[in-house]
Amino acid sequence: MCTLVFAWQVFTDAPVVAAANRDEALGRPSTPPEIVEESPRVLAPRDEEAGGTWIGYNERGVFVAITNRWTGADGEATAERSRGLLVRDALRQASAEEAARLVERELDDRRYDGFNLVLADANAALLVEWDGDSRRVRNFDPGVHVVVNVGADGEYAIPEARAEAERRRRRTPGRWRRRSRSNPERRAARGSTARRT
């Protein structure tokens, strides 16, 4: 699951501070962050397969990051355009608000697979949620926020197909028991002789 954690308007010297992981497709080739655009200058990693990115920052102070969004679809990509290219387009904008308007126009004109997209600068922080059919745009309040594949900040929409898969996983006896051993059982399994008194 992709996870983005960011602080907006929390630190006086840095309006946006972020940490993220990208683990949907571990084998997908990418390059480390570098300057990928010159006007404005954009720092971002590059997805070598589709040419886009999943996170970046431009010289005007615009931060953009995306996670895939779990939908009811079977996981097959059906989009005509990569979400990472949408992130690159947004990073060319002068503000988070301008980037959000660009994303809305793109969603009116082209088909993208589901995503959660954060757009932030010193003045605004927005989340665009897209499930492949409908979008929702909301503003973040100052603070620390967590965005994952199913939503943000505790407002999660887990598709029934994903929820059912999780219920099946939990009902798998051997796998569940191995994970639910108590600490003494784990120590014994590792061969530890230390005991609690």
Image (cartoon, helix red, strand yellow):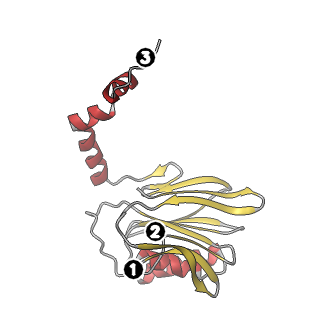
Is residue 101 at least partly visible in the picture?
no
Q: Is residue 40 left or right of residue 73?
A: right
Asked whether 14 or 166 is in front, the reply is: 14
What's the distance in space between the residues labelled 3 and 2, CA to CA? 55 Å
Q: Is residue 182 above or below residue 110?
A: above
Type of amino acid at the residue the image marks with label 3: Arg
Q: Position of residue 17 (x, y in %)?
A: 65, 60
Query: Residue 49, image x and y in percent?
Result: 37, 78
Q: Amino acid at mark 1?
A: Ala
- Badge 1 is on which residue? 50
As drawn, the residue found furthest toward the bottom would be 39
**Disc 2 on helix, strand or loop?**
strand
Which is nearer the N-term, disc 2 or disc 1?
1
Q: Residues within 10 Å of mark 1 (few under 14, many from 20)?
A: some
- Label 2: how many Cα within 10 Å (few below 14, some 14–19, many 20+): some
Q: Quadrant of residue 93?
A: bottom right
Q: Residue at x 46, y 16 (%)?
A: 196
Q: Nearer the viewer, residue 61 or 127?
A: 61
